[in-house]
């Protein structure tokens, strides 16, 4: 076959080569995996010839397997971030900023695995959904970048919690200043920065003394995809089918209890389970479905009357959309799934988790969704009161967009 007039042989071969992307999805919780799969599916619609590989850890690999997504073999060499986060947590308390600070060894290991992967295989595009290791070390070693690089996140800015005092305030400001300096020095290292949400979802706080406002800086440095749910809302017929599959009869009320995929929520699950008899005493029609996720053994939990306990549940959003009330941790994905489904819910952020207590709570406040309760203020009575008060109410939250995955994919497609 001859070459295209005016084009080199190298150019022709490049056009014949299948295009490839490497997707890195944060393993801390399952929300990143669900939205990333939705974005990947939309990206394939725009580029049908695109081959996407995933470099990922458990529990993300569990979700990818269910979706039929190809996991790169080098994933087995990654050090597990979720296990580290679980080791750092206790009794529904996770000092998230400090846990990240103590994760250097894991991040270095995982970046080296990533670097080996992109050394061995050429990728047209690398997509990092809160892939902190890759983003940081590429900025420190920009000569290692040999692909288009896109960064995704649903929050911007490390923020101190009150318990950390002045020392933590200084450290978070220092971390933020380093990030701002990296971005200013190597503006072209990220070919695209995408915020999963809208400008008003960004907190209007300062990065620290003498530093910019977070929202103003984010608006100037990010594209906004809107929120990515990764699913279409269930209609009433579909909700009824889900409830029937669970054995819920028409006059019963379903409460779903879940704490996400990272395995740090067992204390909250046990506290809600303790509240079940009280809640059912006050509202006998209540039935409970407790979902432990992939990293908590359901056999370790008691099963009071009126309660079902399950482990990992694919497409958990279907159960959330079918419930009459939910009790959840303060993770963004689960709370936004309930918001999108217009279901009442109680959320209990992890103590000292700056993202859940500041960033997520700010966003839920904008949507007018959820009833927030602090864990240290709860007991079985408080939780039972909240469940009975919220069950069956008819929320009128701000609508959540359904085209976020397509908008994110369109932004990424321009890089291929």
Image: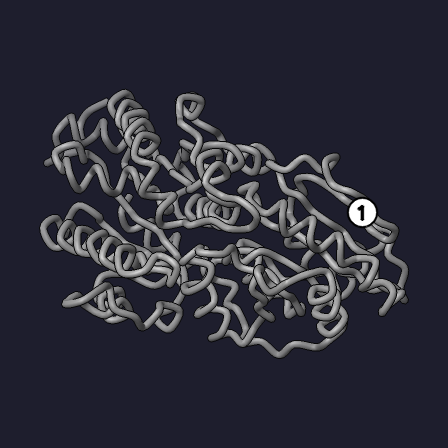
Q: How many marks?
A: 1
- The chosen color scheme is one colour
Residue nearest the viewer, comparing 81 with 187? 81
Residue drawn at x 63%, y 42% is 293
Q: Quadrant of residue 216?
A: bottom left
Q: Quadrant of residue 79?
A: top left
Instruction: Quarter of the image for the C terminus: give it.
Output: top left
**Residue 297, position in %: x, y?**
68, 35
> Label 1's element?
strand
**Residue 319, position in %: x, y?**
71, 54
The residue that disc 1 covers is 308
Residue drawn at x 36%, y 53% is 153
Instruction: Quarter of the image for the N terminus: give it.
Output: top left
Q: Is residue 154 left or right of residue 299?
A: left
**Residue 257, position in %: x, y?**
69, 54
Does 246 sit above or below residue 368? above
**Residue 415, position in %: x, y?**
27, 47
Q: Is residue 206 left or right of residue 144?
A: right
Q: Residues within 10 Å of mark 1 (few under 14, many from 20)?
A: some
Residue drawn at x 50%, y 58% is 332
Is any atom of residue 378 visible in this view? yes
């Amino acid at each position: 076959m001859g070459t295209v007039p005016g084009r080199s042989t190298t150019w022709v071969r490049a056009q014949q080569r299948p295009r490839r992307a490497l997707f890195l999805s944060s393993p801390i919780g399952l929300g990143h995996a669900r939205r990333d799969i939705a974005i990947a599916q939309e990206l394939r619609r725009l580029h049908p010839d695109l081959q996407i590989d995933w470099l990922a850890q458990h529990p993300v690999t569990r979700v990818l397997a269910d979706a039929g997504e190809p996991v790169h073999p080098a994933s087995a060499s990654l050090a597990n971030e979720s296990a580290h986060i679980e080791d750092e947590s206790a009794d529904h308390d996770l000092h998230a900023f400090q846990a990240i600070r103590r994760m250097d060894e894991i991040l270095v290991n995982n970046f080296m695995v990533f670097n080996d992967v992109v050394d061995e295989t050429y990728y047209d595009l690398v997509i990092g959904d809160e892939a902190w290791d890759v983003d940081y070390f590429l900025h420190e070693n920009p000569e290692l970048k040999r692909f288009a690089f896109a960064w995704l996140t649903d929050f911007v800015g490390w923020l101190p919690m009150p318990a950390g005092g002045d020392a933590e305030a200084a450290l978070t400001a220092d971390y933020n200043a380093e990030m701002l300096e990296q971005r200013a020095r190597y503006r072209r290292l990220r070919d695209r920065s995408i915020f999963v949400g809208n400008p008003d979802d960004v907190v209007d706080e300062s990065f620290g003394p003498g530093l910019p406002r977070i929202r103003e800086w984010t608006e100037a440095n990010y594209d906004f995809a809107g929120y990515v749910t990764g699913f279409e809302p269930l209609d009433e017929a579909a909700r009824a089918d889900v409830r029937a599959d669970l054995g819920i009869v028409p006059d019963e009320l379903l409460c779903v209890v879940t704490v996400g995929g990272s395995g740090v929520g067992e204390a909250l699950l046990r506290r809600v389970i303790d509240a079940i008899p009280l809640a059912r005493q006050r509202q006998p029609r209540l039935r409970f479905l407790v979902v432990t996720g992939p990293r908590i053994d359901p056999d370790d939990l008691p099963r009071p009357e009126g309660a079902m306990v399950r482990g990992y549940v694919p497409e958990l959003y279907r159960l959330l959309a079918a419930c009459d009330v939910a009790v959840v941790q303060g993770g963004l994905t689960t709370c936004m799934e309930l918001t999108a489904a217009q279901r009442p819910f109680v959320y209990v952020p992890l103590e000292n988790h700056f993202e859940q207590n500041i960033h997520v709570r700010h966003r839920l406040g904008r949507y007018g969704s959820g009833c927030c309760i602090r864990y240290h203020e709860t007991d079985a009575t408080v939780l039972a009161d909240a469940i009975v008060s919220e069950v069956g109410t008819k929320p009128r939250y701000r609508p959540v967009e359904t085209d976020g995955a397509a908008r994110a994919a369109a932004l990424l497609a321009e890089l291929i």
